[in-house]
Amino acid sequence: MEPELVQDYFQHRLNDAVVQDEKLALYLLVIGERPGVLIMNPDMKDRNILEDFCREFDLEYIYTGGEGERGLLDKILRRDSRLFKGGFFIASDGERFEELESTEGRFYGFSDEGVGEFLGYPEDDVEYFASNVVEGHIERPTREKAEELVSEGVIRKKDLKYLELVSYVPRPEEENIVEAVELGKKREEKILEIDEDLGIDTGAKILGQIFNDPLYSE
């Protein structure tokens, strides 16, 4: 990757096109730590930026859903009140779209399981999401279990921040949460390694924004 290109997109051009979690997901995609990314409800201007991004980084994409741009108030409030919305799916390998498009469901026309598989999430955690998302509050049991593991000394309080780097909600079981924490640690190491190799601090800045929460302090 070209350092100047990485800095241009991740420190400037993507700032208004995606939210912080999506920027992290895109960064993980270009450094080989994720097979696919979903950008939810981009407007036409944002899609143009994402299309340019895909061309520059040699990525494949499909878009499914509505047209039109968000209004000024929507952009200020970081919301989307448009009636017709869509999903912008990006992958390093175009063959991943074949499996995704073979499914049907409520998630931009695809099933929860299909989208989870496309994004590279663990099968057990995808099943947990798909089975419980309709009832809502799927994060609460996982958060409570993670806090229990902290109190038992299985993981440290500051380890909770690594769950932000996996982009999915682990099943509220010790094995799933510990596995997610370890994946998060691996991704942090890779991000900082890329920074060192390219002579930039783009990844460190993204991590700083993601981890900027007093919840993770000892």
Image (cartoon, grey):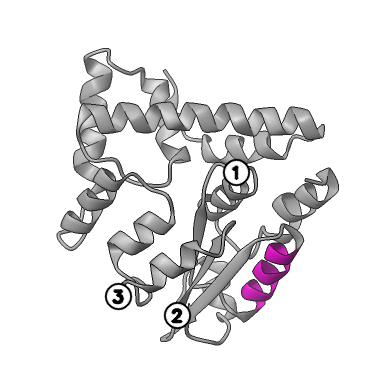
Q: Which residues are magenta?
A: 45-55
Q: CA distance from mark 2 to mark 3?
A: 17 Å
Of the residues shown, which amino acid type is indicated by label 2?
Answer: Lys
Q: x, y percentage for residue 35?
A: 51, 51
Q: x, y percentage for residue 205?
A: 67, 38
Q: Which residue is mark 2?
A: 85
Which label's residue is closer to the chain start, 3 or 1?
A: 1
Q: Which residue is mark 3?
A: 104
Closer-to-camera residue (105/150)? 105
Of the residues shown, which amino acid type is indicated by label 3?
Answer: Glu
Whether residue 197 is situated above or below residue 109 in the rendered picture: above
What residue is rendered at 77% in x and 45% in y? 1
What residue is rendered at 42% in x and 49% in y? 120
Tag 3's secondary structure?
loop
Which label's residue is closer to the chain start, 2 or 3?
A: 2
Residue that sits furthest to the top in the current view: 153
Q: Which residue is mark 1?
A: 32
Residue 19 picture quarter: bottom right
Question: Where's the C terminus, which quadrant?
Answer: top left
Closer-to-camera residue (116/208)? 116
